[in-house]
Image (cartoon, grey):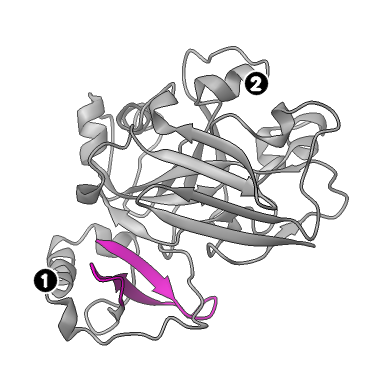
Protein backbone atom coordinates (compact mmCIF):
# COMPACT_ATOMS: atom_id res chain seq x y z
CA UNK A 1 0.00 0.00 0.00
CA UNK A 2 0.96 3.61 -0.57
CA UNK A 3 -0.18 5.50 2.52
CA UNK A 4 -0.01 9.27 2.86
CA UNK A 5 -1.36 12.21 4.83
CA UNK A 6 -2.88 15.24 3.15
CA UNK A 7 -4.06 18.67 4.24
CA UNK A 8 -2.70 21.74 5.95
CA UNK A 9 0.29 21.38 8.27
CA UNK A 10 -0.80 20.04 11.63
CA UNK A 11 -4.22 19.01 10.37
CA UNK A 12 -3.39 16.26 7.88
CA UNK A 13 -5.80 13.38 7.33
CA UNK A 14 -4.92 9.83 6.29
CA UNK A 15 -5.23 8.74 2.68
CA UNK A 16 -4.02 6.09 0.28
CA UNK A 17 -3.04 6.08 -3.35
CA UNK A 18 -4.85 3.22 -5.07
CA UNK A 19 -3.58 1.10 -7.94
CA UNK A 20 -5.18 3.44 -10.48
CA UNK A 21 -3.38 6.46 -9.01
CA UNK A 22 -6.55 7.85 -7.39
CA UNK A 23 -6.18 9.51 -4.02
CA UNK A 24 -8.60 8.00 -1.50
CA UNK A 25 -9.70 9.30 1.91
CA UNK A 26 -8.91 6.91 4.79
CA UNK A 27 -10.21 9.13 7.60
CA UNK A 28 -13.37 7.01 7.92
CA UNK A 29 -11.23 3.92 8.51
CA UNK A 30 -8.39 5.10 10.79
CA UNK A 31 -7.72 8.41 12.55
CA UNK A 32 -4.14 8.80 11.29
CA UNK A 33 -1.06 7.07 9.92
CA UNK A 34 1.31 6.81 12.86
CA UNK A 35 3.10 4.36 15.11
CA UNK A 36 -0.13 3.39 16.86
CA UNK A 37 -1.60 2.29 13.53
CA UNK A 38 1.53 0.42 12.47
CA UNK A 39 1.55 -1.53 15.74
CA UNK A 40 -2.16 -2.44 15.55
CA UNK A 41 -2.71 -5.53 13.41
CA UNK A 42 -6.50 -5.13 13.48
CA UNK A 43 -6.31 -1.52 12.31
CA UNK A 44 -3.86 -2.46 9.58
CA UNK A 45 -6.21 -5.23 8.48
CA UNK A 46 -8.99 -2.64 8.14
CA UNK A 47 -6.72 -0.47 6.02
CA UNK A 48 -5.76 -3.41 3.80
CA UNK A 49 -9.41 -4.36 3.36
CA UNK A 50 -10.22 -0.75 2.46
CA UNK A 51 -7.35 -0.71 -0.03
CA UNK A 52 -8.61 -3.91 -1.64
CA UNK A 53 -12.02 -2.27 -2.05
CA UNK A 54 -10.64 1.19 -2.68
CA UNK A 55 -13.45 2.08 -5.06
CA UNK A 56 -15.69 2.31 -1.99
CA UNK A 57 -13.46 4.94 -0.36
CA UNK A 58 -14.20 8.61 -1.09
CA UNK A 59 -11.94 10.02 -3.80
CA UNK A 60 -10.02 13.18 -3.02
CA UNK A 61 -9.30 15.97 -5.47
CA UNK A 62 -5.50 16.15 -5.48
CA UNK A 63 -5.44 19.51 -7.26
CA UNK A 64 -3.96 22.04 -4.87
CA UNK A 65 -4.06 19.60 -1.96
CA UNK A 66 -0.91 19.68 0.18
CA UNK A 67 0.80 16.36 0.80
CA UNK A 68 2.22 16.24 4.31
CA UNK A 69 4.70 13.82 5.86
CA UNK A 70 3.28 10.29 5.49
CA UNK A 71 3.81 9.54 9.19
CA UNK A 72 2.46 11.46 12.16
CA UNK A 73 3.73 11.61 15.75
CA UNK A 74 7.20 10.32 14.89
CA UNK A 75 9.01 9.06 17.97
CA UNK A 76 12.64 9.51 16.97
CA UNK A 77 14.70 9.81 13.82
CA UNK A 78 17.95 7.85 13.90
CA UNK A 79 20.36 8.59 11.06
CA UNK A 80 23.26 6.57 9.67
CA UNK A 81 26.28 8.57 8.50
CA UNK A 82 28.71 7.52 5.76
CA UNK A 83 26.69 4.45 4.84
CA UNK A 84 27.52 4.32 1.11
CA UNK A 85 30.90 3.24 -0.19
CA UNK A 86 30.96 5.93 -2.89
CA UNK A 87 29.94 8.72 -0.48
CA UNK A 88 32.66 7.77 2.00
CA UNK A 89 35.16 7.81 -0.86
CA UNK A 90 34.11 11.23 -2.19
CA UNK A 91 34.45 12.82 1.26
CA UNK A 92 37.82 11.20 1.95
CA UNK A 93 36.47 9.26 4.94
CA UNK A 94 37.45 5.77 5.97
CA UNK A 95 34.85 3.05 5.57
CA UNK A 96 33.37 2.75 9.09
CA UNK A 97 33.70 -0.50 10.99
CA UNK A 98 30.33 0.08 12.64
CA UNK A 99 27.39 2.31 11.73
CA UNK A 100 27.86 6.00 12.58
CA UNK A 101 24.82 7.34 14.39
CA UNK A 102 23.29 10.76 14.85
CA UNK A 103 19.77 11.99 15.50
CA UNK A 104 17.30 14.37 13.94
CA UNK A 105 14.45 15.80 15.98
CA UNK A 106 10.96 14.90 14.72
CA UNK A 107 10.17 18.62 14.41
CA UNK A 108 12.58 18.83 11.44
CA UNK A 109 10.09 16.79 9.38
CA UNK A 110 8.03 18.57 6.73
CA UNK A 111 6.09 17.46 3.68
CA UNK A 112 7.76 16.41 0.42
CA UNK A 113 6.97 19.70 -1.36
CA UNK A 114 7.17 22.07 1.59
CA UNK A 115 9.69 24.92 1.62
CA UNK A 116 13.18 24.18 2.95
CA UNK A 117 14.71 27.08 4.87
CA UNK A 118 18.39 28.00 4.55
CA UNK A 119 19.49 28.80 8.13
CA UNK A 120 20.59 32.31 8.99
CA UNK A 121 24.34 32.61 8.54
CA UNK A 122 24.53 29.40 6.51
CA UNK A 123 27.08 29.13 3.72
CA UNK A 124 27.20 25.32 3.44
CA UNK A 125 23.64 23.98 3.22
CA UNK A 126 23.83 20.61 1.45
CA UNK A 127 21.50 17.99 -0.02
CA UNK A 128 21.22 14.24 0.68
CA UNK A 129 18.66 11.86 -0.82
CA UNK A 130 18.04 8.93 1.54
CA UNK A 131 15.95 5.82 2.03
CA UNK A 132 13.88 6.20 5.20
CA UNK A 133 12.88 3.07 7.11
CA UNK A 134 9.79 3.17 9.32
CA UNK A 135 9.62 0.76 12.26
CA UNK A 136 6.42 -1.23 12.75
CA UNK A 137 7.23 -3.51 15.70
CA UNK A 138 9.13 -2.84 18.91
CA UNK A 139 12.74 -3.96 18.42
CA UNK A 140 15.06 -4.88 21.31
CA UNK A 141 18.29 -6.87 21.04
CA UNK A 142 17.55 -8.46 17.69
CA UNK A 143 19.93 -11.23 16.70
CA UNK A 144 19.82 -11.26 12.90
CA UNK A 145 19.41 -8.95 9.94
CA UNK A 146 16.39 -11.01 8.92
CA UNK A 147 14.77 -10.13 12.23
CA UNK A 148 15.63 -6.51 11.55
CA UNK A 149 13.74 -6.55 8.25
CA UNK A 150 10.77 -8.23 9.93
CA UNK A 151 10.41 -5.19 12.19
CA UNK A 152 10.11 -2.74 9.27
CA UNK A 153 6.63 -1.43 8.48
CA UNK A 154 7.57 0.42 5.33
CA UNK A 155 9.80 2.80 3.43
CA UNK A 156 9.78 6.41 2.28
CA UNK A 157 11.91 9.05 0.58
CA UNK A 158 13.80 11.34 2.97
CA UNK A 159 15.83 14.46 2.26
CA UNK A 160 18.52 14.70 4.94
CA UNK A 161 19.29 18.39 4.48
CA UNK A 162 22.58 19.27 6.21
CA UNK A 163 24.55 22.40 7.07
CA UNK A 164 28.19 21.31 6.79
CA UNK A 165 29.80 24.22 8.61
CA UNK A 166 27.45 23.74 11.57
CA UNK A 167 28.00 19.97 11.36
CA UNK A 168 31.80 19.87 11.16
CA UNK A 169 33.36 23.22 11.98
CA UNK A 170 31.36 24.54 14.91
CA UNK A 171 32.89 22.52 17.74
CA UNK A 172 30.15 20.03 18.37
CA UNK A 173 28.42 16.89 17.22
CA UNK A 174 26.91 16.36 13.78
CA UNK A 175 23.50 17.19 15.28
CA UNK A 176 24.23 20.94 15.03
CA UNK A 177 24.15 20.76 11.25
CA UNK A 178 21.27 18.31 10.99
CA UNK A 179 18.48 19.77 13.10
CA UNK A 180 17.74 23.12 11.53
CA UNK A 181 14.10 23.92 10.80
CA UNK A 182 12.61 22.02 7.80
CA UNK A 183 15.74 19.84 7.40
CA UNK A 184 13.91 16.52 6.91
CA UNK A 185 11.30 16.51 4.12
CA UNK A 186 9.62 13.07 4.16
CA UNK A 187 7.32 11.34 1.70
CA UNK A 188 5.21 11.55 -0.36
CA UNK A 189 4.20 8.02 0.61
CA UNK A 190 4.82 5.40 3.23
CA UNK A 191 5.10 2.29 1.05
CA UNK A 192 4.44 -0.83 3.08
CA UNK A 193 7.27 -3.34 3.30
CA UNK A 194 5.37 -6.02 1.38
CA UNK A 195 5.59 -3.83 -1.74
CA UNK A 196 9.38 -3.43 -1.56
CA UNK A 197 10.82 -6.74 -2.68
CA UNK A 198 14.43 -5.82 -1.88
CA UNK A 199 15.37 -2.63 0.00
CA UNK A 200 18.94 -3.14 -1.24
CA UNK A 201 17.93 -2.73 -4.89
CA UNK A 202 16.43 0.76 -4.94
CA UNK A 203 17.81 3.42 -7.31
CA UNK A 204 17.79 6.91 -5.79
CA UNK A 205 18.46 10.24 -7.49
CA UNK A 206 18.58 13.96 -6.71
CA UNK A 207 18.62 17.07 -8.93
CA UNK A 208 19.47 20.69 -8.10
CA UNK A 209 17.95 23.24 -10.48
CA UNK A 210 17.40 20.44 -12.98
CA UNK A 211 20.99 19.14 -12.87
CA UNK A 212 21.44 15.54 -11.75
CA UNK A 213 23.70 15.49 -8.70
CA UNK A 214 23.14 12.10 -7.08
CA UNK A 215 22.47 8.87 -8.95
CA UNK A 216 23.01 5.83 -6.76
CA UNK A 217 21.51 2.62 -5.45
CA UNK A 218 20.89 1.20 -2.01
CA UNK A 219 22.94 -1.77 -3.23
CA UNK A 220 25.99 0.38 -2.37
CA UNK A 221 25.09 0.64 1.31
CA UNK A 222 27.86 -0.44 3.67
CA UNK A 223 25.36 -1.58 6.30
CA UNK A 224 22.11 -2.84 4.72
CA UNK A 225 18.69 -2.10 6.16
CA UNK A 226 18.20 -5.31 8.13
CA UNK A 227 21.63 -5.04 9.71
CA UNK A 228 21.07 -1.38 10.60
CA UNK A 229 17.83 -2.24 12.45
CA UNK A 230 19.50 -5.17 14.23
CA UNK A 231 22.50 -3.05 15.22
CA UNK A 232 20.43 -0.14 16.53
CA UNK A 233 18.29 -2.46 18.63
CA UNK A 234 21.37 -3.21 20.78
CA UNK A 235 21.84 0.48 21.66
CA UNK A 236 18.25 1.70 21.93
CA UNK A 237 14.71 0.38 21.78
CA UNK A 238 13.06 1.03 18.44
CA UNK A 239 9.32 1.63 18.61
CA UNK A 240 6.57 1.66 15.99
CA UNK A 241 6.68 5.05 14.31
CA UNK A 242 10.41 5.54 14.72
CA UNK A 243 12.26 6.46 11.51
CA UNK A 244 15.76 5.53 10.35
CA UNK A 245 17.46 7.61 7.63
CA UNK A 246 19.89 5.13 6.12
CA UNK A 247 22.52 7.36 4.49
CA UNK A 248 23.17 8.96 1.12
CA UNK A 249 25.12 8.05 -2.03
CA UNK A 250 27.86 10.12 -3.65
CA UNK A 251 27.15 13.48 -5.24
CA UNK A 252 26.64 15.84 -2.30
CA UNK A 253 27.99 19.39 -2.53
CA UNK A 254 30.59 18.71 0.17
CA UNK A 255 32.21 16.07 -2.04
CA UNK A 256 32.55 18.28 -5.13
CA UNK A 257 35.49 20.49 -6.22
CA UNK A 258 35.79 24.11 -5.10
CA UNK A 259 33.82 26.24 -5.28
CA UNK A 260 31.41 23.74 -3.80
CA UNK A 261 27.84 24.37 -5.04
CA UNK A 262 26.06 24.64 -1.72
CA UNK A 263 22.38 25.51 -1.70
CA UNK A 264 21.04 29.05 -1.66
CA UNK A 265 17.59 30.62 -1.47
CA UNK A 266 15.85 30.22 -4.83
CA UNK A 267 17.37 26.83 -5.59
CA UNK A 268 15.02 23.94 -6.37
CA UNK A 269 15.83 20.42 -5.24
CA UNK A 270 14.05 17.35 -6.62
CA UNK A 271 14.66 13.80 -5.46
CA UNK A 272 13.18 10.36 -5.93
CA UNK A 273 13.52 6.68 -5.11
CA UNK A 274 12.07 4.17 -7.55
CA UNK A 275 8.69 2.97 -6.30
CA UNK A 276 8.65 5.33 -3.32
CA UNK A 277 7.78 8.61 -5.02
CA UNK A 278 9.29 12.00 -5.71
CA UNK A 279 9.88 15.22 -3.77
CA UNK A 280 10.38 18.84 -4.82
CA UNK A 281 11.43 21.73 -2.60
CA UNK A 282 12.17 25.37 -3.25
CA UNK A 283 14.66 26.91 -0.82
CA UNK A 284 14.08 30.20 0.96
CA UNK A 285 15.99 32.11 3.61
CA UNK A 286 14.99 31.47 7.21
Q: Is residue 82 visible?
A: yes
Task: Where is residue 117? Give x, y as percent.
Answer: 73, 60
> Quarter holding the N terminus?
bottom left
- Near-viewer residue (278 or 48): 278
- Near-viewer residue (22 or 115): 22
Q: Label 1, on which residue?
A: 49
Task: Where is residue 169? Give x, y as percent.
Answer: 81, 30
Residue 153 shown left or right of residue 211 in the figure: left
Q: Is residue 123 above or below residue 233?
A: below
Residue 238 shown left or right of residue 279 in the figure: left
- Secondary-structure class at tag 1: helix
Q: Is residue 160 visible?
A: no
Precedes in sequence: disc 1 or disc 2: 1
Q: Estimate how packed mark 2 is, as few (under 14), some (14 to 19) or many (20 or more) residues with alpha carbons within 10 Å.
A: some
Q: Estimate how packed mark 1 is, as few (under 14), some (14 to 19) or many (20 or more) residues with alpha carbons within 10 Å.
A: few
User: Can you tell which mark lies on residue 90?
Assistant: 2
Q: Which residues fall within the magenta stretch? A: 1-22
The residue depicted at 24 percent of the width and 42 percent of the height is 151
Q: Is residue 5 above or below residue 156?
A: below
The question of residue 13 being in magenta is answered with: yes
Residue 174 shown left or right of residue 257 in the figure: left
- Secondary-structure class at tag 2: helix
Amino acid sequence: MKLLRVGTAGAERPALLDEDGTLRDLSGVVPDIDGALLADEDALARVRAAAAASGELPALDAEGLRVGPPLGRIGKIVCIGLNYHDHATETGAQIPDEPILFFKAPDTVVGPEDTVLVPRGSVKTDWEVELAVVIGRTARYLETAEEGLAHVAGYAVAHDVSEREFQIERGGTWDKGKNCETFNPLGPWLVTADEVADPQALPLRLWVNGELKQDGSTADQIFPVGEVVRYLSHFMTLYPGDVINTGTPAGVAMGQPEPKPYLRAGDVVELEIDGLGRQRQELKDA
